Image (cartoon, rainbow, N blue to C red):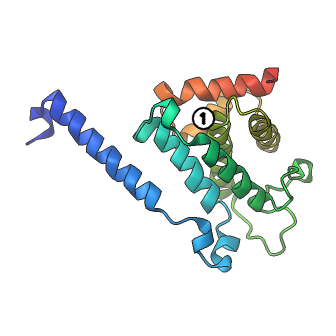
Amino acid sequence: IPWCAQTSEEVSTERKSVGEVVQANLVSLPASYEFPDSYNAIYRLYEPCRLAAMVYSMLVIFPLPAANRPFKQLVAQLIQSLITVDGDEGSGWAAESGQWPWEYEREGSQDLTPEEEERVSCLYLWIIVMGGIASRGMGPNSEWFATRFEQTLQMKGMSTWEEVKQCVTSIMWMDSVCDYGGLAFWRETRDGF
C-alpha cells in the first residue's frame, strides 16, 4: 500500500512497529563489559552513549509511562560509565586543564580534528543532558549531572539554552518530548535544586 493511501490507523501501527524494532535493537546492544578491554580503551563513550540512548528511547521512540521507566537503575549505570570515562573516581575531571574527559591524563590519546571534537563533545553533552533529564528529582544524582553539565558548558564555551539545544539536536532530540525535561534541567542547574 503506498504511504499516501494508508489510513491514520495503519500509519500509527507502522510507527509503533518501527519503534518496537528500534527499542528491541537498542536493548540488544551489548554492555561494554562484554567487549575486550582494548575495545573499551578506544571507544570510551560507547557505554555512556548506549545508556543515554536507552533513556532517549524510553522518552521518545518507545515511550514508557513515568512509573514504568527504570531511570533509577539507568542513572546509576550512566554515572558509573561516565566515571569510567573520566577515570577520576567521580570527582569531576579538570575542565580547567583544557582537555575533555576522554583525553584527560591519557597517554597517546588520539588527536581529533576540530570537526570531530565538536561532534564528540556534542555527543558528550547530549549524554549529560539525557542523564540530567532522567535524574531529575534524584537528589545527589541530579547534582552529579548538574556538575558535569556545568563543566561541559565551560569546556564548550556555552552560556545559553539555545547553544545547548543546537548541540543536542545534532545528536537526537525531539522538541515536543525533550524540551520540557531539558529546559527544566537547564533551569535547575542555573537556579539550584
The part of the image, by quadrant, that contains residue 16 is top left
Residue under the point 91% across and 48% down: 96
151 to 35, vertically: above or below: above
How many labels sit on residues?
1
Q: Label 1 belongs to which residue?
A: 166
- The residue most toward the front is 67
Residue 126 percent location from the top left of the image: 63, 43
Q: Is residue 144 in view from this perspective?
A: yes
Out of 150 and 165, give the one closest to the viewer. 150
Q: Is residue 126 in view from this perspective?
A: no
Q: Amino acid at mark 1?
A: Gln
Q: Please identify the quadrant where the C terminus is shown.
A: top right
Residue 122 percent location from the top left of the image: 65, 46
Callout 1 crowding tier (Cα within 10 Å): few <14, some 14–19, many ≥20: few
Residue under the point 55% across and 38% down: 169
120 to 145, vertically: above or below: below
Secondary structure at badge 1 equals helix
Q: Is 43 positioned to the left or the right of 156 in the image?
A: left
Q: Is 42 positioned to the left or the right of 62 in the image?
A: right
Residue under the point 58% across and 48% down: 52
Q: Please identify the quadrant where the N terminus is shown.
A: top left
Residue 3 percent location from the top left of the image: 15, 38
Residue 120 percent location from the top left of the image: 65, 54
Out of 78 and 189, give the one closest to the viewer. 78
Residue under the point 66% across and 53% down: 77
